[in-house]
Amino acid sequence: MINIYEVNETNNMIEKDNLDVRTITLGLSLLDCADNDIDRICDKVYEKITHRAQNLVKTGEEISREYGIPIVNKRISVTPVSLIAGQAAKSSDDFVKLAKRLDKAAKAVGVNFLGGYSALVNKGMTPAEELMIRSIPDALSSTDIVCSSVNVGSTRDGINMDAVRLMGDVILETASKTADNDCLGCAKLVVFTNAPDDNPFMAGAFHGVTMPDAVINVGVSGPGVVRYALSKIHGADFETLCETVKTTACKITRVGQLVAKEASRMLNIPFGIVDLSLAPTPAIGDSVADILCEMGLEHAGAPGTTAALALLNDQVKKGGVMASSYVGGLSGAFIPVSEDQGMIDAVEAGALTIEKLEAMTCVCSVGLDMIAIPGDTKATTISGIIADEMAIGMINQKTTAVRLIPVIGKGVGDRVEFGGLLGYAPIMPVNAFSCDDFVNRTGRIPAPIHSFKN
């Protein structure tokens, strides 16, 4: 039972510390929409989404009003489109046609984003999957709320370097095709290794093939709450620090569990998971970097940053699993640059580099996220950065991702404005030394020895 003290405490978290439920995400299987005709697929997809998701936004708003909990986004994730259109699509244009229909369906039901314009190519690409990946720049430049992801590796499969090399080209082309909008298309495109099937966060959400026909996943967020809790124990020992993060994460997750169960009941759709991730926003104080500073760092990126982030990530998970019957998705702490004012400040102060962010990704939930880089960065350099991050995920048996934004016409010292939850970002320098000969090798990097557990 939740007592009156916890109710008042939660109200304070919402009013003063930016606590919110970041998203209710409806996962939908589109496997039953597969066909050998792309137009029929488009019609089936539109009908299923508009039917099954017709009450999603309304339900989220009702829960928010009843419980006083801000629910920032209502989203949809679908089966990777490379699987449902693989037989019918004969060209990249066929996939783009499907992307536009997905965009239209998502807008019809009023959600913020739809994820699942995706391909899973851990070991290799079918011709249809390659067509789909090559269609991404046109798809993201001709839609508004469709998000795309490509999983190029896993601990069990290794890394598909052919796909990594291709994604360098795709990211640059996506930037070029959305250059008149500050290359925003790249903010809707993520490259993964070990991508989870039940992630409710964009841009990397998709509905895995092992999932039921429909499911409700919820992502909570509360960096401001954790920062405020730590401000009250300034200078305490590590045991107290850990216990404070853990108990605070438990309280935050209870809010997510409540929303998830209510949404499941009202929509008559099974409850899937609560994702425990601390997802920052550009709002002052709602920052993972500020949590690290509250632990005793001058800026995120200072010596000790990776250790502090490891502590935070671990204690968030330990607290969250006590508060929810099903925890999944990414779960931990996001460290995007543009979406976190503290991270932006650290970059502008010279405390945080891409190389330090890469080290931090060894212990956090995701990876190199929402990082703006010079628009003249080579495709092979982008592929090299992706390969490095994928290797971290493969070796450490964790999810890692890359969301880089090469900003056409801008360089180091400039700034790019995205607006809303995406915030703004300083253009960060990248290592200018060549990795061309490495990236241009064909084939894949084999799975590490510890993957052979059978």
Image (cartoon, helix red, strand yellow):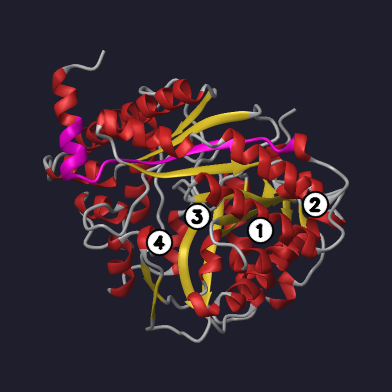
Q: Which of disc 3 and disc 4 is earlier in sequence?
A: 3
Q: Which of disc 1 and disc 4 is earlier in sequence?
A: 1
Q: Are marks 4 and 1 in contact (CB under 8 Å)?
A: no
Residue placed under numbered mark 2 in the picture: 39
Q: Are marks 4 and 2 in contact (CB under 8 Å)?
A: no
Q: Give, as a three-letter code, the residue at label 4.
A: Leu
Q: Which of disc 2 and disc 3 is earlier in sequence?
A: 2
**In the rendered image of this protein, does residue 177 appear above or below residue 154?**
below
Res 207 seen here: no
Q: Are marks 4 and 3 in contact (CB under 8 Å)?
A: no
Check residue 317 for magenta coloring.
Answer: no
Q: Which of disc 2 and disc 1 is earlier in sequence?
A: 2
Query: For the point 18% across and 25% down, which residue is it?
Result: 7
Circle 2 sits in a helix, a strand or a loop, which is it? helix
Check residue 12 for magenta coloring.
Answer: yes
Q: Give, as a three-letter code, the residue at label 1.
A: Lys
**In the rendered image of this protein, does residue 190 appear above or below residue 199?**
below
- Crowd rating for badge 2 (residues with CA inside 10 Å; few <14, some 14–19, many 20+): some
Q: Locate residue 441 relative to residue 62 in the image: left or right.
A: right
Which residues make up the magenta segment?
A: 10-31
The numbered disc on residue 422 is 4
- Crowd rating for badge 3 (residues with CA inside 10 Å; few <14, some 14–19, many 20+): many
Residue placed under numbered mark 3 in the picture: 367
Residue placed under numbered mark 1 in the picture: 100
Q: Which of disc 3 and disc 1 is earlier in sequence?
A: 1
Measured as percent of width and height from the top left, residue 58 is found at 42, 36
